[in-house]
Amino acid sequence: MKFTFFNLMPWPYLPDDFRKKYRSVWVDIPSTLYDPVKGHTVYNDYLDTLEYAEEVGFDGIGVNEHHANAYGMMPSPNIMAATLARNTKKAAVVVLGNSIALYNPPVRVAEEFAMLDVISGGRLIAGFPVGTSMDTNYAYGQVPALTREKYTEAHELIIKAWKEQEPFAFNGRYNKLRHVNCWPKPVQNPPPIYIPGGGSLETYDFCIENDYVYCYLSFSGFIRAKKLMDGYWQRVEEAGKDPSPYRGGFAQTIIVAETDEEAEKEYREYVDYFYNRCLHVYPGFADAPGYRTIKTLQANVTEQMTQNANVSKMSWQELIDQGYVIAGSPDTVVEQMTRLATTLNVANIFCLIHIGNMPKDKCMRSAKLFAEEVIPKLRNVFPDFADDDRFWINPIEHVSEATVEEAN
Amino acid sequence: MESRIVNINNRADIRIYEGGSGPDLFFLHGAGGLLQDDPFLVELMKHYRVCAPLLPGYEDSECEHLRDMLDFTLHSFDVLEHLKLTKPLLVGHSMGGMIAAEMAAVAPNEVEKLALICPAGIWSDDYPIPDLFALLPYELPGLLFHDAEKNGQLMSAGGDFNDPVFLTEFLVGNARRMGSAGKILFPIPDRGLSDRSYRIKAKTEIIWGAQDKLIDPHYGELFNQAIADSNLTLIQEAGHMLPYEQTEQVLGVLSRF
């Protein structure tokens, strides 16, 4: 299995009465709640946790893109990834990802991802999300019903920009470019591509056709995710592809402490902060009409509506029993993580170890315990696919001389 | 009300509501679509031969080829031509008014009589139009009607949102309708009409509800300034849904043609 330490980079100073006073953490949250001086420390603390995650033994470190919000303060994940690429040596730099329909032209993504891959020596994992409706439609003004078409074209353009050896013209509907000429080119060409999805059938098929990793980034835990991932694996089977668990990724909130009791006592407040403040999105911004395809809506609309149960009213045990949070002693977490991996058949885990307003030291403590006490016991959950490295990074030192020469 | 599906140039299947007798009237609906047994159309049909096409995304109208303002404008001309209507009285409400005004700007010699009922299509920073796409269903009646209590029930088909089947149907329908409308209204309902409105030659009646809370009556003046041969009528005790709140008065303005 592969473990990526994720830091969503939430703003940790939302007031206690945030839910009551403000309708949304996204789109129209007043920026008077932000303080750039505190922000300086916050960013640097968060980057420290990511670098520390490599040190203690995570396989990857992850960042992502969001706009106009206090949930995750990375409008440009590539800036974060650039500092990480410099300050780390081994870990995959997982950018999950760039919302490619938002870049004009999307060649910019091809270029910046190539830069990151070159700087890091071939350690980039490239994510191509459609982006949440809050980001893509409400904050960045994309027409909801055209977003997917634009996304598809952007994907085609980026892949072609990486692959083509000669400059080419691209006559797209949304991109008219006479001279596409991507300098630099990525070391890994292409890097492993991960696609965050939320149950849309089109995204299942897109991943399967291209051998991309389908990543379900839910905050409602692995038990609720089963139906969605089962749907994905069924499509994988129907397409005649192997069921390698490395074709799937899942994000999970994880807390490790010395004991189960300590996990609750020391970390509960950060979980509450996250679910009650960071996920407080005004329903009118959640899903612009036209953003999801009709096919997807018909398939699982009511299911998605009922996904966000009232977490604030859940007891700690309920949060754990329902899979929202995996928390406890290393043994408890090993047991629950094994259940997660086998329930979903997923080998790429995006570990949400920084949660809400968790301070750096507590985050690092939990990360260290996970890396040292949990990861080693989970390495062989999928023995049949032990050697499957098709979906992971292939850094320069692993590239043979011949391949390098060929690329030149 | 009589309706049928017509195929337009093998590109679109469009439901057309039609009926009545009198001069030809071509009606373009707003972002909400037509109401059940649309009371405004019923009244129009007492005076006109009415053709009211549903845009793609509304009920079972389908067309995958519409993306931008020009597409919507030309599509509406295609429907007009298919129905063999020559220079009918062109009436558009809200989003339909935006399309109608574009038609008159794009082909000024084809549109001679134009009625714009609180049309979208112009933006003024001084009078920002609420974001229709970020509103929750329960917020709509208050914005759309002058008397939401009396008229708000026009919008609910009497369904139960706790029924998952109804809920799915509603959300799918809403996603289809507003997804389609979003192509010309999202995120700002301005696709450059004010750059082209100088071309409009039609005699134009602009009709606005004095209590319109969605598109402020100030926009009536902006449209009036933007179109050469135009006349603005403000109707009291009417909101954005004025064709339904003050039907007789709207018909009275239309009778000036």
Image (cartoon, rainbow, N blue to C red):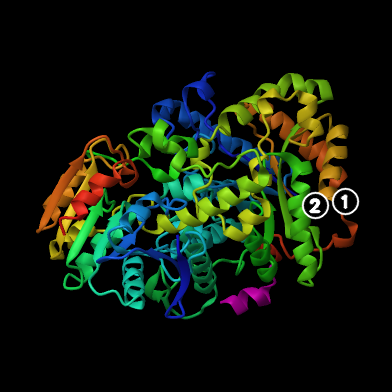
Residue A320 in the magenta stretch? The answer is no
Q: Going by the image, does A302 lie left or right of A39?
A: right
The image position of residue B40, as x and y in percent, is 35, 51
Residue A406 in the magenta stretch? The answer is yes
* Residue type, label 1: Val
Q: What residue is pinned by disc 2?
A: A1
Q: Which residues are magenta?
A: A399-408
Mark 1 or mark 2, which is nearer the start of the sequence? 2
Is residue B147 among the parts visible in the rendering? Answer: yes
* Residue at point 28%, 54% (across, down): B190
Foreground pick, A309 / A368 = A309
For the stretch drawn in magenta, the main secondary structure is: helix
Q: Residues within 10 Å of mark 2 (few under 14, many from 20)?
A: many
Q: Secondary structure at mark 2?
A: loop
The image position of residue B175, as x and y in percent, is 52, 53
* Residue type, label 2: Met
The image position of residue A29, as x and y in percent, is 44, 32
Asked if disc 2 and disc 1 are in contact, CB closer than 8 Å, the reply is yes
Cα–Cα span, label 2 and label 1: 7 Å
Q: Quadrant of residue A273?
A: top right
Q: Going by the image, does B243 lie left or right of A144?
A: left
Is residue A121 among the parts visible in the rendering? Answer: no
Q: What residue is pinned by disc 1?
A: A381
Q: Going by the image, does B36 lie left or right of A55?
A: left
